[in-house]
């Protein structure tokens, strides 16, 4: 234990983390930069903060304040001690609706403040796209803005008073008329009045540098406002009084279509006199699908407000009339508006990939120019990109002249980094030529501080240095930011990654087979750190259950990054830190769809477990549940299911078996079916009937051995819809598609018996060699099916997802894998595509439950929604993950997190269900979780429809 760590542990009541994991989680923010801290402290209160500052000052160690870690310029990283305010100092102290103010701690997430203010008809004005995870402290440090700044300004416009600790331990209460000013600040400003009046560009999004002009007497000598945007370099915020604004009772969204980006940019400033709440811009190359958008190559999203829907609509229609547009759309439905806004909010992640899948990075994320000059600036910006042979997709706050863009810089090679520097220097000159600010929202950090002399001149930058010395004479707070900055091309987070591809098992087709590139996908926007999900969202259930960064998708990606770097996490694939962080990953695949950059942590976890346990004994659960298909087949072949069930019902025997198998003691062992689905199929004849399309029904492990009633119901419904149902062949060589077996004498003599399996349980436990062998055997069995046009209908969503994604990505060298993956359909998709004229039975009941996480992430549920609607099953299914997630919830040590995940969405939805509601759960895990935690029987949609047929 170092002297610094020991001193901090004696001095503070909050957590002190100098371990590898704590440090690895804070090496990066959402920028291109990386610094390895000495340790992390989560203070409990202002006294803890003061104690940390005192200890670090005595040891000469810098201090960096950190909120949600979503900063894009590098200012939330440092080499000293990082203060994490999100763990304890995250409270809303109080709201005064009459005064329209709130008192907040720095670690409070913005959405929590919005939730508390909403019942009073109030809100906090600024709203960055990261509103679900960014903190008020971070917003004050960066002077954040968001899409509503044309109406409500920047964070500085909403700050009333700030409680701040200086590096030397002084407690200040900052406000207007020099309130809380440190000694020497007023004298500094009084001596530079002319410079303060003339040296700062007058534009709505001037975030760069220190806001020293707020100290002018005609501006109220506002010390609190001048502190905003100082990026933690002047003092440490411990509490803030912020102003709230009245939230419009109704809103309308006018989406204006323009021929191109320049047309949209030039139109934006002309709409400001109409008093819109937002004027956001986006071009077609950033939109995955233009469905639901008006015609055009670029769009302005203009929001209006009013006391009534009619008033808001009238204002939106006035905007449309005033705009010279190709096409337009006015939306007043809140759900429709949310859908459209989600496109804009996800842009910060979507923009990290070019249309061809290549990487793009921040660095020039938020320059701002006067709105009237935006069109000309964008043209010059595009020309500069072309001159440097770079690509980027601008979007952002057109009404404020603020543009976000990610550019396909090559930050891995020396030549690419040199180009990054040349482009940055030239673009800074272009911004200044248009009267703009190098930063219009996210702060300067390391990305732009070096270039501040180009914007302000050397004398004003020298004034910034003098101001820093007044506040922090020892340069203890976030050194290297804003003044005396580190070079913009130093400390790049990619420089530590291996240059040669890492030997891996999966194909990583979207990353060119490069595992390092796959890990680099996580840029740190931290959508996985949200404490609630909207709609059918899933990511990240383990973070919502624990609240710990290590159990977020971003946290795990950071540890994998450090594992590849080898500097902090030094034992590679054998790392216990990475293993422990991945241990609570449910492999729900939610991040694959909900993460804006489609990080696939389930695949990364499987990859890691494969290497981590290579040549070593695995946990007992990997053998007990990873090999579940083998154990269940043995029980079926020996017809010992009744014996197994009887033994499992004897509690002492069950307890011993669970302990030996690494299964949580709180869990009940599911009962095996007395008759497997395949045996029932053969007993009823084993042949398809009817004259419709042939579909091959996949007998997954769960349907086959644990829930054969689902398979029987699916057969009945598919046949009622006029389809011919067959099961996959069970003999390799000479098998016949259509009866699930082979009747040829030659085939019986030469073929080998087998049973198809998607390999899911082996993949989820990282037994990839075994998974690959199982999958190849399955492809051999399915060879006759692949010679037909028959679809493969999979009832268990997790197995369908494994066949769609894991199969072709693990067997990327076998073309049959992609062919089988393309054949996989869900139950609802099969009915919709192959029996389009069939009308399902009218169940006419309310429905509750949860969309399976794998279905949400990989398969999609649009066909299921339409089928439920057609059958009269009313109601929306909840999002999230049931928490059992295959083997996860059964493993010892996971029960509490598993139950907490179920309590997040699923169990509350079921408890609040109306009488007579159907509880839908297509996944075996979901049904098991419902039964064991709530005593509720969930049913597959096929079972509900089969009952309706009766």
Image (cartoon, rainbow, N blue to C red):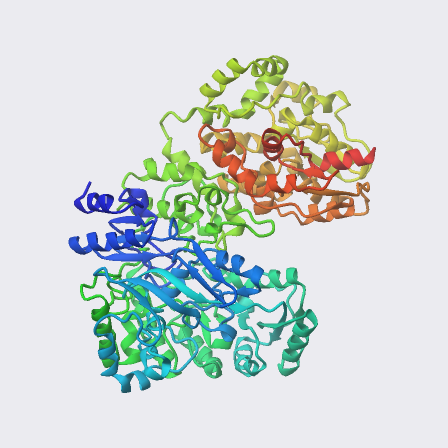
Measuring from the top left, give residue 206's x and y in whole percent: 39, 76
Measuring from the top left, give residue 465's x and y in whole percent: 22, 73
With respect to residue 43, does 402 lie above or below?
A: below
Measuring from the top left, give residue 333's x and y in whole percent: 67, 63
Farthest residue to the front: give it: 98
- The image quadrant where one finds the C terminus is top right
Residue name at image x 51 percent, y 35 percent? 898
Tell me if 523 is positioned left or right of 414 in this view: right
Residue name at image x 36 percent, y 72 percent? 225
With respect to residue 867, does 188 lie above or below?
A: below
Measuring from the top left, give residue 343's x and y in whole percent: 56, 62
Residue name at image x 59 percent, y 46 percent? 879
How many marks do you count on the picture? 0
Residue closest to the eye, 237 or 823: 237
Quarter of image, res 211: bottom left
- The image quadrant where one finds the N terminus is top left
């Amino acid at each position: 234990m170092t002297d610094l760590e020991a001193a901090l542990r004696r001095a503070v009541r909050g957590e002190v983390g100098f371990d590898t994991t704590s440090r690895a989680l804070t090496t990066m923010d959402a920028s291109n930069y990386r610094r390895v801290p000495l340790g992390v402290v989560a203070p409990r209160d202002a006294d803890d903060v003061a104690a940390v500052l005192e200890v670090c000052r005595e040891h000469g160690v810098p201090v960096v304040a950190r909120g949600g870690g979503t900063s894009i310029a590098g200012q939330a990283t440092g080499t000293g001690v990082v203060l994490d305010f999100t763990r304890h100092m995250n409270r809303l102290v109080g709201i005064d609706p009459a005064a329209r103010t709130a008192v907040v701690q720095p670690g409070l997430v913005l959405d929590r403040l919005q939730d508390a203010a909403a019942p009073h008809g109030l809100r906090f004005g600024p709203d960055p796209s990261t509103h679900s995870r960014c903190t008020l402290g971070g917003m004050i440090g960066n002077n954040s803005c968001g899409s509503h700044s044309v109406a409500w300004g920047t964070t500085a416009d909403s700050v009333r008073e700030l409680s701040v600790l200086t590096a030397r331990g002084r407690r200040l209460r900052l406000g207007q008329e020099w309130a809380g000013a440190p000694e020497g600040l007023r004298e500094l400003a009084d001596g530079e009045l002319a410079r303060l009046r003339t040296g700062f560009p007058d534009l709505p999004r001037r975030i760069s540098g220190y806001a020293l002009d707020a100290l002018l007497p005609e501006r109220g000598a506002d010390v609190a406002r001048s502190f905003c945007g100082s990026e933690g370099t002047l003092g440490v915020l411990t509490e803030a009084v912020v102003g709230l604004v009245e939230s419009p009772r109704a809103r309308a969204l006018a989406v204006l279509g323009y021929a191109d980006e320049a047309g949209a940019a030039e139109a934006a400033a002309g709409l400001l006199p109409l008093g819109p709440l937002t004027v956001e811009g986006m071009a077609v190359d950033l939109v995955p699908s233009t469905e639901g958008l008006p015609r055009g190559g670029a769009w302005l999203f203009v929001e209006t407000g009013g006391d009534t829907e009619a008033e808001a609509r009238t204002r939106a229609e006035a905007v449309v009339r005033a705009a010279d547009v190709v096409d337009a759309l006015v939306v007043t439905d809140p759900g429709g508006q949310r859908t459209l806004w989600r496109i804009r909010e996800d842009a910060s992640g979507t923009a990290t990939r070019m249309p061809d899948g290549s990487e793009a990075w921040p660095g020039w994320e938020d320059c701002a120019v006067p709105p009237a000059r935006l069109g000309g600036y964008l043209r010059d910006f595009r020309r500069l990109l072309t001159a440097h042979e770079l690509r980027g997709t601008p979007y952002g706050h057109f009404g404020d002249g603020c543009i976000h863009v990610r550019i396909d810089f090559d930050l891995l090679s020396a030549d690419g980094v040199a180009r990054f520097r040349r482009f940055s220097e030239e673009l800074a000159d272009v911004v200044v030529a248009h009267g703009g600010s190098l930063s219009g929202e996210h702060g300067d950090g390391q990305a732009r501080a070096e270039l501040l002399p180009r914007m302000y001149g050397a004398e004003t930058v020298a004034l910034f240095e003098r101001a820093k010395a007044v506040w922090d004479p020892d340069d203890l707070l976030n050194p290297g930011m804003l003044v005396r900055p580190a070079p913009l091309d130093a400390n790049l987070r990619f420089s530590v990654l291996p240059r040669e591809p890492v030997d891996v098992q999966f194909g990583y087709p979207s990353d060119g087979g490069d595992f390092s590139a796959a890990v680099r996908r996580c840029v740190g926007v931290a959508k996985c750190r949200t404490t609630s999900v909207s709609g059918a969202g899933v990511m990240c259930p383990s973070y919502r259950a624990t609240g710990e960064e290590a159990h977020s998708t971003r946290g795990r990606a950071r540890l994998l990054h450090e594992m590849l770097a080898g500097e902090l996490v030094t034992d590679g694939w054998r790392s216990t830190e990475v293993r422990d962080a991945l241990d609570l990953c449910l492999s729900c695949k939610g991040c694959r769809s909900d993460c804006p950059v489609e990080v696939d942590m389930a695949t990364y976890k499987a990859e890691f477990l494969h290497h981590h346990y290579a040549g070593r004994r695995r946990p007992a659960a990997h053998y007990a549940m990873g090999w579940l298909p083998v154990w269940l087949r043995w029980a079926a072949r020996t017809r010992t299911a009744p014996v197994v069930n009887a033994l499992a019902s004897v509690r002492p025997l069950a307890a011993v078996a669970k302990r030996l198998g690494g299964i949580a003691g709180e869990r009940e062992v599911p009962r095996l079916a007395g008759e497997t689905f395949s045996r029932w199929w053969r007993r009823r004849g084993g042949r398809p009937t009817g004259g419709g399309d042939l579909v091959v029904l996949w007998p997954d492990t769960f349907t086959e051995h644990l829930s054969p009633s689902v398979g029987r119901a699916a057969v009945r419904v598919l046949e009622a819809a006029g389809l011919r149902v067959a099961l996959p062949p069970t003999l390799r060589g000479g098998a016949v598609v259509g009866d699930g077996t082979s009747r040829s004498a030659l085939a019986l003599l030469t073929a080998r018996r087998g049973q198809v399996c998607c390999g899911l349980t082996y993949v989820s436990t990282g037994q990839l060699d075994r998974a690959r062998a199982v999958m190849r055997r399955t492809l051999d069995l399915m060879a006759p099916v692949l010679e037909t046009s028959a679809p493969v209908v999979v009832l268990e969503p997790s197995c369908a997802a494994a066949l769609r994604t894991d199969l072709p990505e693990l067997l990327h060298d076998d073309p049959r894998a992609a062919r089988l993956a393309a054949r996989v359909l869900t139950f609802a998709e099969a009915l919709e595509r192959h029996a389009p004229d069939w009308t399902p039975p009218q169940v006419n009941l309310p429905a509750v439950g949860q969309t399976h996480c794998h279905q949400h992430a990989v398969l999609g549920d649009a066909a299921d929604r339409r089928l439920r609607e057609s059958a009269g099953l009313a109601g929306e299914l909840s999002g999230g993950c049931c928490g059992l997630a295959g083997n996860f919830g059964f493993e010892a040590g996971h029960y509490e997190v598993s139950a907490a995940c179920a309590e997040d969405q699923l169990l509350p939805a079921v408890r609040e269900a109306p009488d007579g509601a159907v509880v839908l759960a297509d996944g075996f895990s979901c049904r098991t979780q419902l039964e064991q935690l709530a005593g509720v029987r969930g049913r597959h949609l096929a079972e509900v429809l089969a009952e309706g047929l009766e």
